[in-house]
Image (cartoon, rainbow, N blue to C red):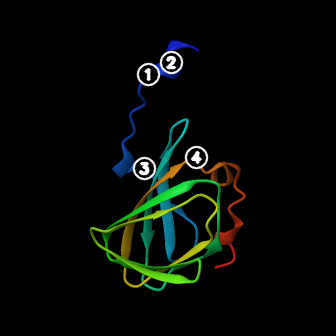
Amino acid sequence: MSNSNRLPRHYPFDEMEFEELTEKVSRRYVTGKNAMLVYFKLKKGAIISKHHHISEQITYILEGSVKVLSEGKEYIVQKGEALVLPSKVSHEFEALEDTIDLDIFSPVREDWLQGSDDYFKSI
């Protein structure tokens, strides 16, 4: 392994462009070898359709609130609260108000990197 692969990588995260996925959902993210950090901006009423992935997901709400439906249960996650979604568990999100959502995924969401995260397109 070369030295450059073993050095920290610094990102001006707050200055990075947002990727607009829908009129109500945008994101920016950085990725390491085994995990990724994602900052979502969700406008009130935004829906992230039912989906699942290999990655474990930790969702932390910085502002606002979301309703998460998973495995027949409803979770309301508000500012200052976190929700851990295990690997391969189906879930969907609805923004109950304008929301800032910080997520960690491990392993990295390869579907995003490959552009095959088509569940956003069904919104």
Instruction: Tell me whether the residue at label 1 lies in contact with that at label 2, contact meaning CB atoms closer than 8 angstroms.
Output: yes
The amino acid at mark 1 is Leu
Q: Is residue 8 above or below residue 16?
A: above
Query: In the structure shown, which secondary structural element does the residue marked by tag 3 occupy?
Result: loop
Query: Badge 3: how crowded within 10 Å, few (<14), some, or many (20+)?
Result: few
Label 4 – label 1 distance at C-alpha: 19 Å
Q: Nearer the viewer, residue 3 or 55?
A: 55
> Is disc 4 placed on a helix, strand or loop?
loop
Residue at the spot of label 3 = 16
Crowd rating for badge 1 (residues with CA inside 10 Å; few <14, some 14–19, many 20+): few
Disc 4: which residue: 108
Q: Position of residue 10 (x, y in %)?
A: 38, 33
How many numbered dots are placed on residues in this image? 4
Q: Amino acid at mark 2?
A: Ser
Distance (Cα) linking label 3 and label 2: 22 Å
Residue 4: give its label.
Answer: 2
Give left or right: position of 3 versus 51.
left
CA gap between label 3 and label 1 equals 21 Å
Q: Nearer the viewer, mark 4 or mark 3?
A: 4
Q: Residue at left 40%, top 39%?
A: 11
Tell me which label, 3 or 2, sits earlier in the chain. Answer: 2
x then y, percent, for residue 60:
37, 63
Nearer-the-camera pick, 110 or 90: 90
Local secondary structure at mark 2: helix
Dot label at residue 7? 1
Q: Determine crowd level at label 2: few under 14, some 14-19, many 20+ residues with C-alpha closer than 10 A.
A: few
Q: Amino acid at mark 3?
A: Met
